[in-house]
Image: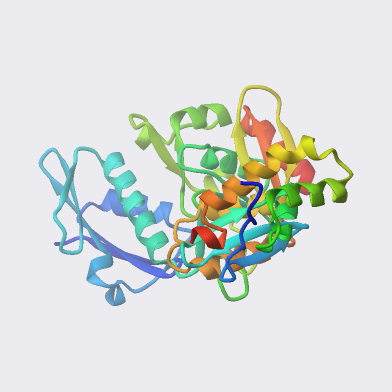
Amino acid sequence: MSASPVGPTSKSIVVTEIDGDLALYDPRRERVLTLNHTASAIWRLIDGTRTLDELVDHLADAFDLDPDSIREEVETTVDRFTKEGFLLSDL
Amino acid sequence: MTGTQSAWRILDDSISLSSDDQHTSEMVSTLLTSFAEIDPVGVSPDNTFFVATRVGGFELRRGDQLAEAHPSRPELILRLLAEINRSVVDSYLGFAAHAGVVALKDRVIAIPGVSGAGKSTITAACLAAGFDYLSDEALCIEFDGQTIDPYPRPLQLHKAAFLALGLDVPIEFAESTEAPITPHDLGARTASPGLRLAEVVFLDRRPGRTHLQAMPRGEAAGSLLSLSFNHYKRPAASFELVTEIMQTARGWVISLEDPLEGARRLQSEFA
């Protein structure tokens, strides 16, 4: 999973920021996903080129955290985006 | 059928009642007194309810549908109110979500929750504490202008709620498990149309003292959308409306056991 790029996100998804956190709306599936602060940061980094390891490294740098301490949360969040159909490769 | 006929404008719908039972007509008129009375002549036959007395009870019929038998007047009235509620919420053209809605001056507070979550009870407690009333059932927001349409239907309370709030069950409904009560009965007035949503307070009923804590606005937006009656009709517009409103409205979770204590907490926070 960590060797291949994550995403990209679908261009049709409507993204709205509320208090710094994101709310996503997929008009094709009529689904809404509201993200907490960490999930919002992960979503913003997904551009279709970064691998999971790179997402973890970017977030660890940005928040001055140990990569190992956030890896599980990043994996879980990306899994959720995938299962909910918000990544283009899964649409 | 001989008897009385009355009609009301409720949200975007018009409802008419034709009844041969004078007492039922008077009770329903009292319960719907918050809504504008209109001429029944213009109401669609599909939106006309007929009540007829029969041996052993009453019949309730809507338009040309089959009649339902009801053994008692309270049961008939509760069923009629439920049918009217379903009709007007279904036909509402704006965004509607399951919520009790009250106001302190011009500050509108929505209390979303699924059926049975205790929306009507906390709403009634708020009215008893001096809040104005908009609804115990539906938060109704216009897509154009984002203003709230009051839907001041009679509050529907279970007997346990009457007890918890220190209220007497209306005598006509003494044998029923629930009863309607008007905002007027609670000493409350109906809020004016045109107000905007300021606070969204999700209910978390649990034993213990009342506790109110802030909730992230994005999470509140998602939860409010998930409690909508009709977002599927205009999903993109509903998403846009709710996320725009939640740019300024605040999200909260209130943990409570005692609805009166909960109402006082909301009053102290939002007054």
Numbered label tally: 0
Q: Is residue B167 above or below residue B73?
A: above
Q: Position of residue B28 (x, y in %)?
A: 36, 53
Going by the picture, which residue comes out furthest to the top?
B208
Q: How is the image coloured?
A: rainbow
Q: As drawn, which residue projects farthest toward the left?
A: B55
Write the residue at 48% across / 27% down: B160
Extreme-front residue of the structure: A3
Q: Is residue B133 visible?
A: no
Note whether residue B214 is visible: yes
Q: Position of residue A22 (x, y in %)?
A: 69, 58
Q: In this image, B68 relative to B154: left or right?
A: left
Q: Residue B166's x, y, as percent?
A: 57, 29
Residue shown at 61%/26% (left/top)? B206
Residue A21 percent coordinates (x, y)? 73, 55
Foreground residue among A51 and A38: A51
- Determine the image quadrant of residue B123: top right
Residue B81 or residue A75, whichever sits in front: A75
Q: Identify which residue, B138 or A24, lies in the foreground.
A: A24
Compared across the picture, whether B75 is left or right of B219 comes to left
Location of residue B136 with respect to B236 vertically, above or below = above
In-image side of A15 versus B62 (left or right): right
Residue ID at (49%, 48%): B182
